[in-house]
Amino acid sequence: MQNLGREFANSANNVIGDIFVSQELLSTETVTSACKLFSVLSKSDALMLFIRVKQGLRSDSNSPNQTGLTRKKYYTRLRNLVDAGLIQKRDNIYTHTTLGSLIYENYVTIVLQGIKNFKQIQMIDTLKQSSLLSSDEITNLMNVVLNKKA
């Protein structure tokens, strides 16, 4: 088993699903950084703040009260998000960094939509297993469920 892991890690390129993954993306440093980022966003209050920052979060003495967090937790989570490179503070307003915007737009919104539409997604899975619809029809249905343009 250990050799299999080494073979995988030592190969020049890998394919995960249909996605080509370069060795550079599988480096220990890259994976460790991704784990730290996911660790920050795995805390519900940090994720809530990250979502609120999309609209710009004003930094003032009343902000912690508006979020329902203690001052300590509020500022700790903001610091975690800043340290992870997901948000930045400019002119007393927290905003997403470029990385934060990419993660928000491409992952967080999709996950939240998926959770919101969980029952419909389960139905799509059932349809996939039944082979009643083509791959294109299932993709179009999924785009409708997630409010994406078909």
Image: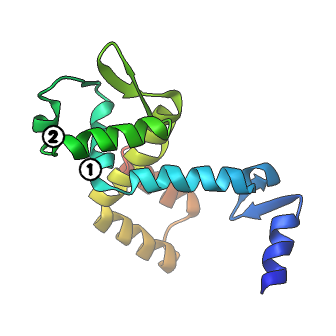
Give x and y (percent) for residue 83: 47, 38
Residue 78, labelled with which disc? none
Q: Is 79 displayed left or right of 28 in the figure?
A: left
Instruction: Give the amino acid type for the residue marked by disc 2 in the picture.
Output: Thr
In the orientation shown, which residue stands out farthest toward the bottom? 1
The residue sitting at 29% across, 24% down in the picture is 56
Classify residue 63 by image quadrant.
Answer: top left
Q: Is residue 149 visible?
A: no
The residue sitting at 29% across, 55% down in the picture is 44
The residue sitting at 27% across, 35% down in the picture is 52
Give x and y (percent) for residue 13: 85, 58
Q: Is 145 displayed left or right of 23 in the figure?
A: left
Q: Secondary structure at mark 2?
A: helix
Crowding at mark 2 (Cα within 10 Å: few <14, some 14-19, many 20+):
some
Q: Spatial distance from mark 1 to mark 2, Cα to Cα?
A: 9 Å
Give x and y (percent) for residue 18: 71, 60
| Relative height, residue 145 to residue 81 (above, below) | below
Judging depth in this view, the residue of 96 and 19 nearest the camera is: 96
In the orientation shown, which residue stands out farthest toward the top? 91
Q: Secondary structure at mark 1?
A: helix
Q: Is 131 displayed left or right of 90 in the figure?
A: right
Crowding at mark 1 (Cα within 10 Å: few <14, some 14-19, many 20+):
some
Residue at image mark 1: 45
Judging depth in this view, the residue of 147 and 60 nearest the camera is: 60
Label count reads: 2
Residue 67, labelled with which disc? 2
Judging depth in this view, the residue of 54 and 70 nearest the camera is: 70
Classify residue 49 by image quadrant.
Answer: top left
| Relative height, residue 112 to residue 130 (above, below) | above
Quick check: marks 1 and 2 in contact, CB under 8 Å? Answer: yes
Q: Earlier along the polypeptide chain: callout 1 or callout 2?
A: 1
